[in-house]
Each structure stands twice: as structure tokens, then as C-alpha cells.
Image: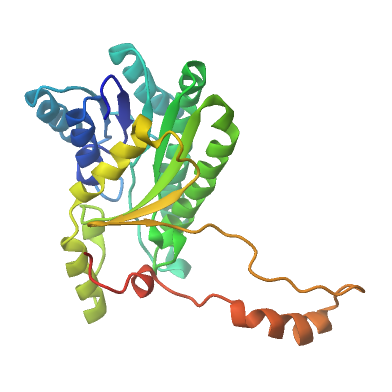
């Protein structure tokens, strides 16, 4: 499915990114394995994870190169695409998977924790995508695969930074899809359900949280890879601007915000009429405050 394609995967030293890199290589792609080698909270640097994935790909007869740059740095993000073009001659797909967590309840979150998570997830996705865009435009093709989360799409406790970044990625993806459609370039999002090093940092204090973690452990990161590889392939040429979720053997298509109801007054609104007329009319359509687990309440299939 990916023969003669070149795919760059960020955060590919472990977890979901690693599985995507390995599968893309098995499907025939040349892979740029990007990983800064940090901890799940974004600290430190280690060349080992990216190099190990490259070694696995090469041992299986595939082609890959390691890139150790941080996606938060514009020159580092550009080097990911440069390595693809200089080593393999082109770039066909970008998988924006790199991420960190710094979870804390909103009123206790400090600015550094906010900025660090936004920087890796949202800013990093923008920088890597922008570096690839001129190459995609010139060749008249290309695929962006961005990783969002149900923490942003639905909601979660203690993740204001992560949720904001992940919902921001949806807006970024949609804008890319609209802006670059005329050049044959597509952009989509995946919200993954999978056990990974990053998810493993979640604190399970209540019995419900413990059951949630045990449920997550049953969902392998390898289950996410086929859909990402599909979106990188020519088979997805008519798929753009969409939001998907992958949960073990389940694949979901998410809705996007659209108007639900409207109320009109020919003489305009006052504060009083908003309270007395508009609120009672719209309130039945208000969505409840929910977490991802409230929506995905059944065991993964």
C-alpha cells in the first residue's frame, strides 16, 4: 500500500509512533523515524529509541533513517522533512504523533506546564506540517495525519493543556485540508485509544479510574497503525478534513461542530429576553459535561 512512498513519523521511538513507523515500513515506505527521546513529561534527550526503531526496520529489510530533532523548534521540524528529501528523495506523508503530558487540575496548572504541552502537540504539528507543505504542493500530492484525543473532542479531568492542544489540532487539520485541497493535499485526524508510556502516567486513584486504566491496557498501540498507514496511502485520496477514532478493533467517524438550533427576535435581543426566552428555548439542547469514558462506556471490542 505504501510502495515508493516516504513517510515521516514524529514521536516514533515508542508506543503508537513506533508501531506506525514499523507498519509503514512493512507496507513498503521509506520512514523517517523522529524522536527527541524525552520522558513522557518532555524531559531529557536520548538517541536510543529512534535508532532502535530504525534498526528494527532495517533488520526486516526496510529502509529508514533516524531524526532526533525536537518538533517544537522550527529548524528541528524542518530537519525532519529535509532528512526525508535528502535521504529518500521526497516526502509523501507526515504523521504528527509526538506528544507529552503534564497533567494537573486547571486551577493548579502553571504557565510552564501549559506552554510545554501546547508547544509539543499544537505548535509542533504546525511546524512539521508547514515544513512539508511546499514539497507536497510542488508534487501535487501529500497526506497529513494528525493525532488528536477524546480529551479534547469530549473532555477529561486535569488535562486543560492537553485538551486545548488536541482540539486545536482539529482546527489546524481542517484549515490545512481547506487551504491545500486544490493542490491535491489532504489532512485528517485520529483520536487513538491505546496503552502507551504516556497513558501509563495517568494517576488511577478511584475504582472507576483503575477500571479505566485496566481497559486501556487491553488496547494495543499496534491497533492504531493500520488506519494511520491507510491515511498515508493513495487509497485515502478522497478522505480529507475528517476526524476518526480507533479503539482496538473499532473505528469511529466523529461529528464536527455545526449549529443545532436558533432563536430569532425581529426587534433584537435584550439581556432580559435572552434570559426569559432564549435560554428556555435552547437549554434542552445544551450538551452535558462529560468525559471520554462517559461516551465510550463499553469495553473495547
Q: Give whichever of 247, 50 is nearer the camera.
A: 247
Q: Is residue 298 left or right of residue 62?
A: right
Which of the 4 image quadrants contains residue 276? bottom right
In the figure, 284 relative to 24: above or below? below
| Residue 256 visible | yes
| Residue 47 visible | no
In the figure, 188 relative to 233: above or below? below
Q: How many marks?
A: 0
Q: Give whichever of 69, 212 is nearer the camera.
A: 212
Picture residue at 31% right of the left edge, 23% below the top:
6
Picture residue at 75% right of the left edge, 80% below the top:
278
Location of residue 194 in the rendering, given as x and y in whole percent from the top left corner: 24, 56
The chosen color scheme is rainbow
Quarter of the rendering occupied by the C terminus: bottom left
Location of residue 296 in the rendering, given as x and y in whole percent from the top left corner: 33, 69
Quarter of the rendering occupied by the N terminus: top left
Picture residue at 49% right of the left edge, 49% below the top:
170
In the figure, 276 relative to 32: above or below? below
Picture residue at 43% right of the left edge, 33% below the top:
237
Location of residue 91 in the rendering, given as x and y in whole percent from the top left corner: 37, 21
Location of residue 108 in the rendering, given as x and y in whole percent from the top left corner: 43, 67
Which of the 4 image quadrants contains residue 104? bottom left
**Which residue in the rendered view is the most extreme toward the right?**
267
Which of the 4 image quadrants contains residue 102? bottom left
Q: Is residue 62 left or right of residue 165?
A: left
Q: Is residue 274 left or right of residue 187?
A: right
Amino acid at each position: 500500500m505504501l510502495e515508493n512512498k516516504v513517510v515521516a513519523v514524529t514521536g516514533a521511538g515508542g508506543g503508537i509512533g513506533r508501531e506506525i513507523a514499523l507498519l509503514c515500513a512493512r507496507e513498503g515506505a521509506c520512514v523517517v523515524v523522529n524522536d527527541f527521546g524525552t520522558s513522557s513529561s518532555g524531559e531529557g534527550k536520548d538517541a536510543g529509541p529512534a535508532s532502535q526503531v530504525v534498526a528494527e526496520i532495517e533488520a526486516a529489510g526496510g529502509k529508514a533513517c533516524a531524526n532526533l530533532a525536537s518538533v517544537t523548534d522550527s529548524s528541528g521540524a524542518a530537519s525532519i522533512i529535509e532528512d526525508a528529501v535528502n535521504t529518500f528523495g521526497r516526502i509523501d506523508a507526515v504523521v504528527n504523533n509526538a506528544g507529552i503530558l503534564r497533567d494537573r487540575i486547571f486551577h493548579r496548572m502553571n504557565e510552564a506546564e501549559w506552554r510545554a504541552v501546547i508547544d509539543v502537540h499544537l505548535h509542533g504539528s504546525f511546524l512539521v506540517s508547514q515544513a512539508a507543505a511546499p514539497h507536497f504542493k510542488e508534487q501535487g500530492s501529500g497526506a497529513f495525519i494528525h493525532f488528536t484525543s477524546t480529551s479534547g473532542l469530549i473532555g477529561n479531568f486535569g488535562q486543560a493543556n492537553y485538551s486545548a492542544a488536541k482540539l486545536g489540532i482539529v482546527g489546524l487539520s481542517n484549515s490545512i485540508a481547506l487551504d491545500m485541497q486544490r493542490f491535491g493535499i489532504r489532512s485528517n485526524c485520529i483520536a487513538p485509544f491505546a496503552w502507551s508510556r504516556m497513558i501509563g502516567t495517568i494517576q488511577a486513584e478511584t475504582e472507576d479510574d483503575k477500571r479505566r486504566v485496566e481497559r486501556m491496557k487491553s488496547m494495543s498501540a499496534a491497533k492504531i497503525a493500520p488506519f494511520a498507514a491507510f491515511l498515508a496511502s493513495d487509497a485515502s485520496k478522497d478522505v480529507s478534513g475528517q476526524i476518526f477514532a480507533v479503539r482496538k478493533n473499532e473505528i469511529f467517524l466523529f461529528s464536527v461542530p455545526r449549529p443545532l438550533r436558533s432563536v430569532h427576535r425581529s426587534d433584537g435581543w435584550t439581556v432580559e429576553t435572552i434570559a426569559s426566552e432564549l435560554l428556555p428555548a435552547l437549554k434542552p439542547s445544551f450538551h452535558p459535561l462529560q468525559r471520554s469514558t462517559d461516551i465510550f462506556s463499553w469495553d473495547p471490542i
